[in-house]
Image: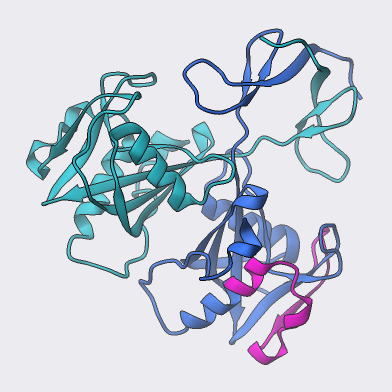
Chain colours: A blue, B cyan
């Protein structure tokens, strides 16, 4: 740990001209806006099989997921999706289309999934214990890490053979999973 | 200002298992992840005219913009777009389609624009000095606040009469505006 630099002490208050509480530094007045975060991910396919990763980290360690993670500063959503696929499955991709834009207000996330063509042989990165290329019937449906993994897989299935489609949003009747 | 509560002091360092610097509290180890923020906005139309707002606030005070702003915690992207249209132009909308998803890495933003039908007579909210419903030829092209306002308007124009389209991304050759 490096030396202490600037002392900051936050309190929750409504800044002038605003309509909701923010964390405001009581020393300098800095307003710490906290907003939803963007997750970017991919449904990557090769020969009608889909790339899945078994999570090496919490949450949902040991469960299967699609390559996905938080967008970082300095990235486009497309770059973030490529980076996550590389980090989690050493996967190189051709992004084909935006597949879904899901909002998960409960955890402050907007998740952007792309449909992508897998260009190489994947292997586990540091956040995965293994990767698999699953045919539709071999997907471990009962061991999927998150609801949005289900959604993206189902939406991918609906786009087979299609181009130029609108991205899907949250499926109907899923508010109990997101609110 | 309320009383000082918890003292927090941040320093930049690379947390264990990560590959980039984060702001880490030197007292408690809290990692302050800073990620891109989501802006949601709308191209709202009525009788082939488009809703524009003249900005009452910085940045770009006095310039014309589309209703748009930061997504808040607890909102879906659709809800954020509706709220911004209400706040800036007292506009009620029927969202029709996702029009564009633009990445502006330079300022850490992902901007999601919807095409929407305007359902009422708009009027300025607190962040606007005036609103207008502009026919295509009456759009104040030289007084638009941001590049993405140009992009969303141009992309909207390309979707007239269309449904079920893929959202647009950043236009080609615009990296000098976003990087």
| Front residue of this view, candidates A111 and A161 | A111
Q: Where residue A5 sits: x, y (%)?
A: 82, 12
Q: Can I make out residue A121 in this image?
A: no
Residue B81 in the image: state x and y as whole percent: 40, 46
Question: In the displayed structure, does residue B114 sit left or right of residue B158?
Answer: right
> In the picture provided, is A11 more to the left or to the right than A39?
right
- Figure quadrant of residue A144: bottom right
User: Which residue: 59% across, 72% down?
Assistant: A151
Q: Residue at x 35, y 24 (%)?
A: B127
Vertical position of residue A20 compared to residue A98: above or below: above
Residue A127 part of the magenta segment: yes
Q: Residue furthest left?
A: B137
| Region of the chain picked out in magenta, as a range | A123-151
Among all residues in the image, which is located at the extreme bottom? A137
Q: Give the position of the N terminus of chain B as an image quadrant.
A: top right
Looking at the image, residue B141 lies above or below residue A1:
below
Q: Position of residue B85 (x, y in %)?
A: 34, 40
């Amino acid at each position: 740990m490096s030396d202490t630099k600037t002392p900051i002490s936050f309190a929750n208050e409504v800044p002038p001209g605003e309509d909701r509480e923010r964390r405001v530094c009581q020393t300098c007045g800095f307003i710490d806006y906290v907003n939803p975060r963007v997750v970017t991910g991919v449904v990557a396919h090769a020969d009608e099989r889909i790339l899945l990763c078994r999570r090496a980290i919490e949450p949902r360690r040991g469960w299967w997921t699609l390559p996905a993670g938080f967008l970082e500063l300095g990235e486009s959503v497309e770059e973030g999706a490529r980076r996550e696929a590389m980090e989690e499955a050493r996967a190189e991709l051709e992004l084909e289309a935006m597949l879904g834009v899901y909002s998960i207000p409960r955890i402050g996330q907007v998740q952007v999934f792309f449909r992508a063509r897998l260009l190489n042989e994947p292997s586990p990165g540091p956040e995965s214990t293994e990767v698999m290329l699953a045919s539709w019937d071999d997907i471990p449906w009962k061991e999927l890490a998150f609801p949005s993994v289900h959604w993206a897989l189902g939406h991918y299935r609906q786009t087979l053979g299609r181009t130029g489609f609108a991205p899907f949003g949250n499926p109907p009747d899923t508010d109990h999973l997101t609110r």
